[in-house]
Image: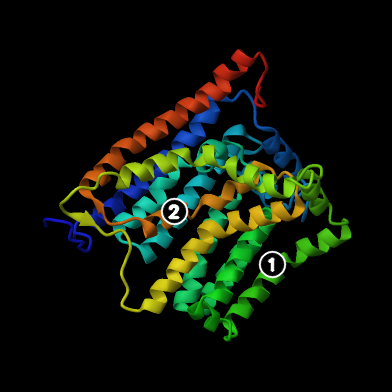
């Protein structure tokens, strides 16, 4: 092909699908071994989770129970709390998010686009560097990504099992951390705004899904009421002291600005992928549907999942005028790769080669940064790290 003609993906493009399992395995190995090498001890959240999980409660004073349950479950395999088990859980959380986003991409994009929607996320620190501290934020990564997949299945296929699956996954997300309520709010807005999705609400199937979610949550809700909403009080206390009137403007900006270093690698990979396309054959990353209503529904869904949680969080922060913890944004970037693939023009073979060459470099820089942060930086600052 010559010129700027856009064509459908070549017949050999599914070959990249065979590369994804190798990527999943490599990611899990890297982010299990790095903390095992450089950490002298577990992070504080992991130690706390092991201590809490021993009792198998329906809730704890600071957080819902899922993350502590996961840590305690590893003791059945190892006989006692083990550091490497916590590291594996963190690495698998990131890998799980990659997998579910890739699966969602297979429903929405070309094989190349589906792979890129997952691979690009390796440039986001929240899905690698930060997962070494398996905590109530990290446990949300695969659950948020799985919820996006189940939402598309529920709306597009409209099967009862998919609506129930969506309800159960979101309930598990709330068992992980209440910030999942922001994802639920974004999904509700999408279901109300999009015509195709809104029509589904006139069926009983979504409401059976809601009932399944409420049934799953009932034990925790009963615990929460009987213990005076302790985790809610803790979350409100973590927002910090009330700021001045100007804080209603500055605090959401500060929260969003703190996310920028976390996504720098993602932005570099995206820029290299579409920079200087040139003439010649191009790969279409997004599928084209003859049904325009369905196509628009999927576009609205992806944009709401990618941007909605951040916007809603910023608005809440603005309304409260209080500083928010930057790490609360950790699960909110799962759908950024998919949004990029949706918005990007068809990419050239040169761009794909440039991306694949740059990706190991970005990963290497993140790994070096991790080693420096946990080995050299404490020496330079003359102050031990949390794991020391």
Residue nearest the observer in this picture, 89 or 221? 221
Say which label, 2 or 1, has the lower sequence index. 2
Considering every residue shown, the one lying at the far left of the view is 2
Residue nearest the observer in this picture, 326 or 28? 326
- Residue 67 shows in the view: yes
Mark 2 lies on a secondary structure that is: helix
Residue at 59% in and 54% down: 310
The mark total stands at 2
Residue at 21% in and 61% down: 6
Q: Quadrant of residue 187?
A: bottom right
The residue that mark 1 highlights is: 216
The numbered disc on residue 99 is: 2
Q: CA distance from mark 2 to mark 1?
A: 25 Å
Residue at 66% in and 36% down: 81
Residue nearest the observer in this picture, 257 or 219? 257
Q: Quadrant of residue 112?
A: bottom left
């Amino acid at each position: 092909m010559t010129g700027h003609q856009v064509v459908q993906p070549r017949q050999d493009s599914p070959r990249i699908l065979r590369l994804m399992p190798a990527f999943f395995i490599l990611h899990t190995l890297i982010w299990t071994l790095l903390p095992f090498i450089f950490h002298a001890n577990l992070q504080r959240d992991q130690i706390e989770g092991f201590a809490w999980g021993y009792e198998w409660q329906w809730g704890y004073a600071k957080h819902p129970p899922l993350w502590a349950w996961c840590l305690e479950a590893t003791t059945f395999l190892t006989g006692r709390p083990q550091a490497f088990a916590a590291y594996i859980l963190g690495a698998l959380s990131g890998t799980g998010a990659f997998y579910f986003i890739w699966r969602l991409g297979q429903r929405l994009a070309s094989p190349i686009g589906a792979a890129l929607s997952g691979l690009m996320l390796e440039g986001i620190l929240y899905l690698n560097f930060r997962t070494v501290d398996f905590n109530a934020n990290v446990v949300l990564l695969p659950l948020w990504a799985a919820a996006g997949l189940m939402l598309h299945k529920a709306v597009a296929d409209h099967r009862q099992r998919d609506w129930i699956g969506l309800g159960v996954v979101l309930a598990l997300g709330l068992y992980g951390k209440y910030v999942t309520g922001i994802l639920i709010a974004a999904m509700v807005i999408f279901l109300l705004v999009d015509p195709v999705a809104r029509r589904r609400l006139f069926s009983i199937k979504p409401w059976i899904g809601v009932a399944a979610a409420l049934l799953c949550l009932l034990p925790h809700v009963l615990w929460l009421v009987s213990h005076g909403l302790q985790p809610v009080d803790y979350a409100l206390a973590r927002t910090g002291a009330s700021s001045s009137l100007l804080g209603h403007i500055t605090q959401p900006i500060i929260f969003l600005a703190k996310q920028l270093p976390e996504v720098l690698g993602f932005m570099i990979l995206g820029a290299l992928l579409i920079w200087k396309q040139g003439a010649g054959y191009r790969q279409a990353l997004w599928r084209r549907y003859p049904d325009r209503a369905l196509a628009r529904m999927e576009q609205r869904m992806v944009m709401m999942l990618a941007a909605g949680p951040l916007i809603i969080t910023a608005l809440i922060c603005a309304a409260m005028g209080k500083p928010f913890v930057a790490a609360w944004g950790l699960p909110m970037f799962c759908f950024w790769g998919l949004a990029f693939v949706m918005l990007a023009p068809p990419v050239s073979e040169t761009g794909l080669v440039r991306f694949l060459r740059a990706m190991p470099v970005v990963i290497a820089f993140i790994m070096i940064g991790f080693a420096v942060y946990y080995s050299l930086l404490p020496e330079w600052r003359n102050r031990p790290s949390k794991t020391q």
